[in-house]
Amino acid sequence: MNLTLLGLPGAGKGTQAKKISRDYNITHIATGDIFRILIEKGTPLGKRAEKYIQQGKLVPDDDAIQIVKEEFSRIDMNTGFVLDGFPRTLYQAEILTEILDDMGYRLDMVFFIKVNPEELVERVAGRRVCLNCGATFHIEYNPPKKEGICDLCGDELIQRSDDQKDTVRKRIEIHSNKVDELVSYYKDLGILRIITGQSIEEIYSNIKMAIEVEL
Ligand code: ADP
Ligand code: ADP
Ligand code: ZN
């Protein structure tokens, strides 16, 4: 099963992708996480991506496509995957279709997590992440048991430097029409599933229902 998640920054792509990956045993590929690892390692691609990410802008398509291609060559494609944060432009979506086609695979379903845009700034501004294990929390909506400490691995939680309110607003603005284009692209392909819901659990249960219909 090969999936991707669409949604504005803060919609819950990462939160839901981790649950799907765990329960259905498929590989989670989060382009934002990979960029952050490359930045920390100081690779040329990481250095190039960093300035875009800090400004809340999209990294150029070719770099994003490159890291996804590398992940596909690294993982066992027969296991299946859930993409999180890719594609983010129509061009990336078209190339993704081609790459998968060349490898003899395709996307089975694309989940669009639809969230009231007014909620997003608070969500992203309250997000806290663990750089050690990748877990994500929210200071109010999904707090760790012990403030500032990851429930899963005990490491310190941090606020991403691109999660400041001003940068978040800019990201939401940049992404809005891109998400619309992606939604219509996948709708035309017949694999779009619109997911609504309020709590993390309610959204996840709607995703699971959509998956079970196909299995
Ligand atoms: P969020 O979870 O807030 O949506 P991500 O962690 O997915 O953010 O991504 C962080 C940043 O990495 C994005 O703001 C963007 O600059 C860059 N990025 C991630 N994925 C892509 C992509 N597919 N294309 C271009 N830039 C990307
Ligand atoms: P994305 O990957 O789409 O940017 P995340 O999964 O990182 O989004 O979620 C953004 C923030 O909002 C995180 O702090 C997360 O804990 C919180 N969050 C995710 N889903 C919900 C929800 N349904 N209700 C409230 N908060 C949520
Ligand atoms: Zn952790």
Image (cartoon, rainbow, N blue to C red):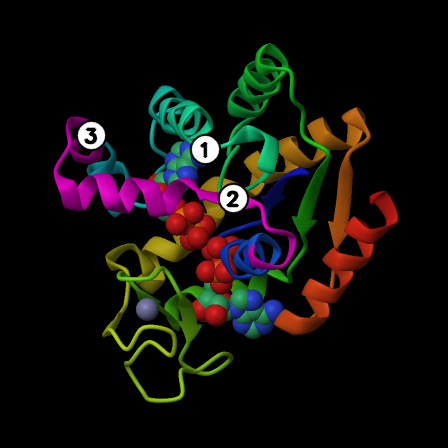
Asked if the residue under mark 1 is in contact with the one under mark 3, i.e. CB atoms within 8 Å, the reply is no
User: From what the image shows, is residue 141 above or below residue 63?
Assistant: below
Q: Is residue 115 visible?
A: yes
Are the residues tagged 2 and 1 within 8 Å (C-beta)? Answer: yes
The residue depicted at 36 percent of the width and 59 percent of the height is 134
Residue 75 image label: 1
* Mark seen at residue 27: 2
* Dot placed on the residue nearer the N-terminal end, 2 or 1: 2
Give the vertical position of 22 relative to 68 (above or below).
below
Given residues 36 and 88, the one toward you in this image is: 36
x 33%, y 54%: residue = 167
Tell me, for residue 33, which label it has, or none.
none
Q: Position of residue 84 (x, y in %)?
A: 51, 45
Q: Residue at x 72, y 30 (%)?
A: 186
Image depth: mark 3 or mark 1 in front: 1
Q: Which residues are magenta?
A: 22-47
**In x, y percent, where is residue 138?**
43, 75
Q: Is residue 169 left or right of residue 34?
A: right
The Cα–Cα distance between marks 3 and 1, rounded to whole angstroms, is 25 Å
Q: Determine the secondary structure under disc 3.
A: helix
Quadrant of ligand 1: it is: top left
The type of residue carrying mark 2 is: Thr
Question: Is the residue marked by circle 2 packed among few (<14), some (14-19), or many (20+) residues within 10 Å?
Answer: many
Q: Nearer the viewer, residue 173 or 191?
A: 191
- Distance of mark 3 from mark 2, alpha carbons? 26 Å
Q: Quadrant of residue 13?
A: bottom right
Q: Which residue is mark 3?
A: 48
- Residue 38 falls in which quadrant of the image? top left
Q: Residue 30 lies in magenta, yes or no?
A: yes
Q: Is residue 138 above or below residue 109?
A: below
